[in-house]
Amino acid sequence: MSRFLDALAGKPVDATPVWFMRQAGRYLPEYRAVRKDHDFLTMVKTPEIAAEITLQPIRRFGLDAAVIYSDLLPPLQTMGLGLHFEPGVGPVIENPIRSTKDVDLLATPPAGETMPWTPEAIRLVKRELGDATPVLGFAGAPFTLAAYAIEGGGSKKYERTRVFMYSEPAAWARLMDKLVTVAGSFLTEQATAGADALQVFDSWAGALSRSDYERYAAPYTSKLIAIAQKTGRPVVHFTTGTAGHLDAVAAAGGDAIGVDAGPSLVEARERTGGRPLQGNLDPYLLQAPWRELRAQTDRVLAEAPATGYVFNTGHGLVPATPPDAVARLTDYVREKTSA
């Protein structure tokens, strides 16, 4: 097995495995060279392009996992929601959910029929990497997908989502079950194509109070994770803004828990019952002077469990991230943690 998969299983490793969320993306010059000729969704939906972008950071940095180049939102398109990405704005849902009828009109087609591009990109990446570097597939958690579908894009207050959730509990349940079906099918197809591990992103879970998370989100995340685990692949459950109820996140499932930059890893370990952990470094630290990045990395590694930890950022790398900082940080973690 690989360092990454061993760490997710809580086994000893010869050095702490390293990968970064959004490691395949806008901070790399080789990515920007591809991006100038293609729009975002075209890159996601063209397997050869998605595979090439996935491989770029592996070739440059020799990271311990290759996360497939994809996005959380294309599954919403297959359900009947229009989606495009506006420069400077981000994702836009063209016909957001505004009524219970909108929920009932949503389709739940099999991902193998409607989203073949990501599984095919995984096959292409596996063909090049073999067993040398594991490939990580992913999908959005039901709450985060629902919030995008209802808000119509990004949001700061999630007002429409909360009002719909509170006002239409039966329709909310139908919506969440449909999202479980579609995201579960997508994760299953990725595993069948060769993904060695899967990650469920609940990027907006921190918008909810603990009680609301446990009532309106966690039961559906649990269903999705259970579907993913039936593939036999380890599942990382990642949330943001949930430091106060990481125990509830862990109770919702996952073989390992992704941790944002909020809590200490000591606290996270206690709240998750000793589950393997991933993450915790603030991604903006990679733009800081090396002395600060090194000090904060030392802190994270000192707080990390002796076994069952994957070094990662607490959220995705941003476009201003210097590639040299990624290289230096990767080498430093390996050198500091080598057995």
Image (tube, rainbow, N blue to C red):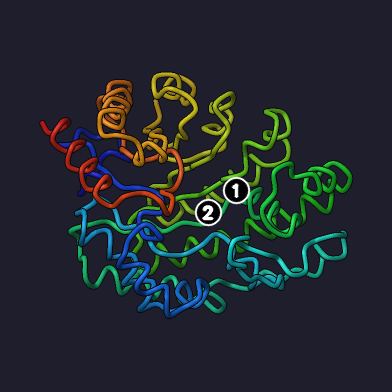
Residue 314's quadrant in the figure?
A: top left
Q: Tell me the residue at 36%/41% (across/down).
A: 287
In percent of width and height, residue 318 lies at 43, 50
Q: Are marks 2 and 1 in contact (CB under 8 Å)?
A: yes
Compared with 86, 7 (above or below) is: above
In percent of width and height, residue 200 lies at 50, 49
Label for residue 227? 2
Compared with 211, 55 (above or below) is: below
Q: Which residue is mark 1?
A: 223
Q: Amino acid at mark 2?
A: Ile
Q: Residues within 10 Å of mark 2 (few under 14, many from 20)?
A: some
Q: Tell me the residue at 52%/65% (across/down).
A: 186
Q: Amino acid at mark 1?
A: Lys
Q: Residues within 10 Å of mark 1 (few under 14, many from 20)?
A: some
Label for residue 189? none
Label 1: element kind: helix
> Left of 332 or right of it: where is 257?
right
Label 2: element kind: helix
Q: Tell me the residue at 71%/73% (across/down).
A: 80
Compared with 21, 130 (above or below) is: below
